[in-house]
Amino acid sequence: MDGATLEPLKVVSTRGMTVDTQEYHPEPRVAAIVASHEHPEFIVNVKETGQVLLVNYEDINNLKTTTIGAARFLHDGGWDSTKRYFMTAANQSDKIAVIDSKEQKLTALIDVDKIPHPGRGANFVDAKFGPVWVTSALGNDKITLIGTDPVKHKDNAWKVVRVLKGQGGGSLFVKTHPKSHHLWVDSPLNPDAKIAQSVAVFDTNNLEAGYQVLPIAEWANLGEGPKRVVQPEYNAAGDEVWFSVWNGKDQKSALVIVDDKTLKLKKVIDDPRIVTP
């Protein structure tokens, strides 16, 4: 699209063959689009076919597209710390696909446990295993750490190096920040209300200690409703973490801000204009 007017300039079909059974799929959905840091390309996840498309936008009249077979049911993903490798979940295939955006090829397919859902994932340096990328899951309580450094930590690269036990399944997002030593894990789709209404936070310097639970929805003090706590996001400085507290459309919702250093409540924003933020 034209960046100023949003006028479509080129339409490209995503219809094609599935990577496993080689069957034609007439309506595959696009599940994620990210911009490459290595080439003038968009990286496009085609969900039902399991194809990753590298679409070069230098000359849209002579469009070049590289098709990479990954695994079916691709969903969301994010970059490793170097922004070279795109780490993306194929959730119903229980795999993480690693795309080398520089070499424009599939680097690895990593088996993980039951419906990984990383959002963009999270990056930090594990004291034992080096740089890692993290995903949680919808289908279980596991938080999976994958090694991402093929140069200085070659033996750990593209392998599951550590699995942490979280509060429970139903997680959608994990988050950390370069200036923080905390790893935040939500569980908004967990059937246990206490879990869905709270968040787990790990100390990345002491992962063996397990997690601390913060009662985000209780702090919001919204009254009735499911009050699902979802998607931790840091501010730019890395000293605050913001949460959405989702409620029914006719109930009060809120944003909750937590001090990342003290893990204490900093502010609740519950303006009436906030409806399932």
Image (tube, rainbow, N blue to C red):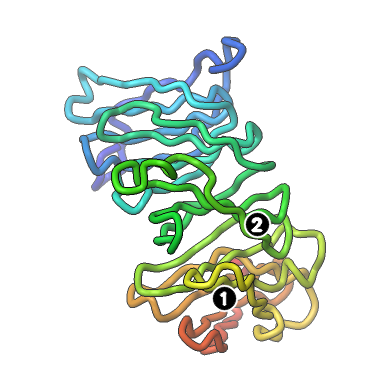
The residue nearer to you, when weighing 29 against 97, is: 97
- Taking the image as shown, residue 226 lies to the left or right of residue 149, namely right
| Image height of 192 relative to 23, above or below | below
Quarter of the image that includes the N terminus? top left
Q: Secondary structure at mark 2?
A: loop
For label 2, the residue is: 171
- Taking the image as shown, residue 142 lies to the left or right of residue 121, namely right
| Image height of 234 relative to 270, above or below | above
Residue 79 lies, in percent from the top left, at 38, 48
What residue is drawn where x is 38% and y is 75%?
Answer: 238
Quarter of the image that includes the C terminus? bottom right
CA separation in Å, label 2 and label 1: 26 Å
Residue 145 lies, in percent from the top left, at 52, 52
- Amino acid type, residue under disc 2 in the picture: Ser
What residue is drawn where x is 30% and y is 28%?
Answer: 104
Q: Residues within 10 Å of mark 2 (few under 14, many from 20)?
A: many
The reply to whether dot 2 and dot 1 touch (C-beta < 8 Å) is no
| Image height of 262 relative to 217, above or below | below
What residue is drawn where x is 66% and y is 34%?
Answer: 92
**Quadrant assignment, res 194:** bottom right
Q: Secondary structure at mark 1?
A: loop
Residue 170 lies, in percent from the top left, at 70, 55
For label 1, the residue is: 273
